[in-house]
Image (spheres, helix red, strand yellow):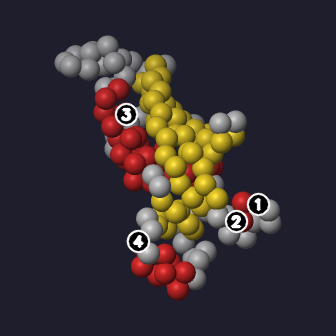
């Protein structure tokens, strides 16, 4: 199997509602996303001959994904009072509500599926929330 890998990073804030520890407080990370695309065989014809896919395409798609989350406050749906969301919105903060707890594990699965929907045959997605801690999502 052939595998190509690319990565992008973004900075954002989050907190873990219902968590008993420091991560229940608002804090930030430099999130690093590492995406692996695979193929059993290389392309045999055309511009992509000899490639799994065009690095430029996967790099661009992953960068667009990372840029969408850059310098945002990411929070789980239902974890903040409506008045809090309204106040932050009125201050023009970049808020992103997600339907899952914003953990590295959930982001790895989420980004995997977003890239797969773009037509890539995904092998895995790793999401680092610190330089030494990452979560990996892959399917059999």
Helix, strand or loop under label 3: helix
Q: Residues within 10 Å of mark 1 (few under 14, many from 20)?
A: few
**Which of the 4 quarters of the picture holds residue 13?**
bottom right
Determine which of the numbered discs, if any, sits on residue 59 in the image. Answer: 3
For the residues labelled 3 and 4, the Cα–Cα distance comes to 29 Å
For the residues labelled 1 and 4, the Cα–Cα distance comes to 26 Å
- The answer to whether 118 is drawn above or below residue 96 in the figure is above
Residue named by callout 4? 92
Q: Residues within 10 Å of mark 2 (few under 14, many from 20)?
A: few
* Numbered disc in front, either 1 or 4: 4
Residue 78 placement (x, y as % from top left):
57, 77
Q: Residue furthest bottom?
A: 83
For the residues labelled 1 and 2, the Cα–Cα distance comes to 6 Å
Q: Using the image as rendered, state which of residue 123 and residue 26 is in the foreground.
A: 26
Helix, strand or loop under label 1: helix
Mark closest to the chain's N terminus, 3 or 2: 2
Residue ID at (72%, 65%):
24
Determine which of the numbered discs, if any, sits on residue 22 in the image. Answer: 1
Q: Residues within 10 Å of mark 4 (few under 14, many from 20)?
A: few
Mark closest to the chain's N terminus, 3 or 4: 3
Mark closest to the chain's N terminus, 3 or 1: 1
Helix, strand or loop under label 2: loop
Residue ID at (40%, 40%):
62
Residue ID at (48%, 59%):
72
* Circles 1 and 2 in contact, beta carbons < 8 Å: yes
Residue 115 placement (x, y as % from top left):
41, 43
Mark closest to the chain's N terminus, 1 or 4: 1
Q: Using the image as rendered, state which of residue 58 and residue 112 is in the foreground.
A: 58
* Circles 3 and 1 in contact, beta carbons < 8 Å: no
Residue named by callout 2? 25
Residue ID at (35%, 26%):
55
Could you tell whether 92 is left or right of 105 in the image?
left
């Amino acid at each position: 199997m052939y595998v190509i890998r690319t990565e992008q990073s973004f900075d954002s804030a989050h907190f873990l509602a219902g968590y008993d520890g420091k991560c229940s407080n608002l804090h930030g990370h430099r999130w690093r996303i590492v995406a692996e695309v695979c193929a059993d065989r290389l392309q045999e014809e055309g511009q992509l001959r000899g490639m799994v896919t065009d690095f430029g395409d996967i790099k661009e798609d992953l960068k667009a994904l990372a840029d969408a989350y850059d310098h945002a406050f990411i929070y789980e749906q239902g974890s903040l009072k409506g008045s809090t969301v309204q106040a932050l919105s009125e201050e023009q903060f970049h808020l992103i509500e997600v339907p899952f707890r914003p953990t590295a594990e959930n982001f790895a699965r989420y980004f995997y599926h977003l890239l797969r929907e773009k037509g890539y045959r995904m092998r895995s997605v790793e999401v680092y929330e610190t330089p030494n801690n990452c979560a990996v999502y892959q399917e059999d």
